[in-house]
Amino acid sequence: MASALFSFLLLFQTIATATPLRPGFYSETCPQAELIVRDVMYKAMIREPRSVASVMRFQFHDCFVNGCDASLLLDDTPTMLGEKLSLSNIDSLRSYQVVDEVKEALEKACPGTVSCADIIIMASRDAVALSGGPNWEVKLGRKDSLTASQADSDNIMPSPRANASYLIELFDKFNLSVKDLVALSGSHSIGQGRCFSIMFRLYNQSGTGKPDPTLEPKFREKLDKLCPLGGDENVTGDLDATPQLFDNQYFKDMVAGRGFLNSDQTLFTFPQTREYVRLFSRDQSEFFKAFVEGMIKMGDLQSGRPGEVRNNCRVVNHRPINILLESLA
């Protein structure tokens, strides 16, 4: 009993100890880690260009829900409803298998060393860089969560219908500025969105039974053909005019009334965010600089909860602490 209790306390101490995030965290324990992540991401992009955009979004969807701890990646269990089926993630997030491939490659090179939470941060950076966007140095050293919560995700993550006022308040809760909000929304420079997310814009904006008046007429006609009333709402459309290139076209499209999502276009129609949209539409280097700053700040979000380095990003290594306590009683 004493030996078992000591083992448990040692385990708890290990998973509860927080290590400060820093660049080069794996330089000694897994020096090839970042190269391995980028190699797998490159191969995924060649296989399916859309996949890197999908993986990039994991950072936002993970970090806003109890910090950057890879809780997003946990599959449901009989006793836990995770985040994958939350309102903002179900039928929206995809390409989880790319993270699985990254983890498998890292486990072969450095078993039990690189956390899934850090994989999300590295892979998100690589998705941007491989798509023509900026490259930057990431801080690493995160631990993976021991649980996940569908309810927490539902309560925190915004919907495609969100307006700029709501988004400003949400980002402020995480100490992210209006500039951070607009810059990070530029993640929609690559990838696609579903018709489901814009049907109300096309046919019933604000319950009027009419389309969103901010939509540029020819763009609206294009979307009407892509997403007809009564059609397949899982059909996808490009989030901007250059969906495989990370650039500032996203902001140019918004200025022209061609933002795909309501939560995108509202950034131009709302006074507090409009000037940043104009700035980034004119100056791509300013957008890149602000985007990197926002991604680093978002990557610093931590829950302070106990964690571990998962062997499989979809499941925890250890039983939950309360069950361990019960087994030791």
Image (cartoon, rainbow, N blue to C red):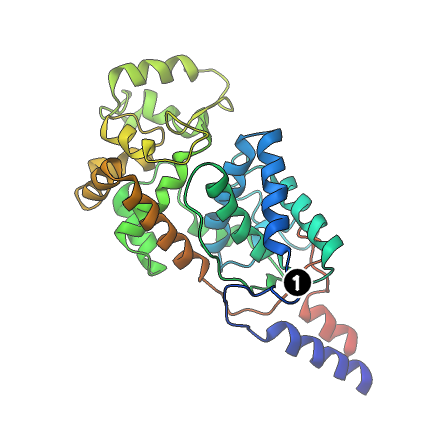
Q: Residues within 10 Å of mark 1 (few under 14, many from 20)?
A: many
From the image, tell me which residue sits under label 1.
Answer: 309
Q: Residue at x 59, y 38 (%)?
A: 42
Foreground pick, 157 / 37: 37
Residue 1 in sight: no
Percent of width and height locating residue 315 = 69, 54
Q: Is residue 107 above or below residue 228?
A: below
Percent of width and height locating residue 13 = 64, 78
Q: How many marks?
A: 1
Query: What is the three-letter code of the residue carrying label 1?
Result: Val
Q: Residue at x 48, y 64 (%)?
A: 302
For residue 253, side relative to residue 236 (left or right): left
What secondary structure is marked by label 1?
loop
Percent of width and height locating residue 280 = 26, 40
Q: Residue at x 68, y 59 (%)?
A: 310
Considering the image in quadrants, where does the C terminus appear? bottom right
Q: Residue at x 29, y 53 (%)?
A: 169
Foreground pick, 154 / 310: 310
Q: Is residue 52 above or below residue 318?
A: above
Residue 271 in sight: yes
For residue 211, side relative to residue 20 (left or right): left
Percent of width and height locating residue 51 = 56, 34
For residue 275, side relative to residue 25 (left or right): left
The image quarter containing residue 143 is bottom right
For residue 266, side relative to residue 96 (left or right): left
Q: Is residue 192 above or below residue 85?
A: above
The image quarter containing residue 324 is bottom right
Considering the image in quadrants, where does the N terminus appear? bottom right
Q: Is residue 244 above or below residue 141?
A: above
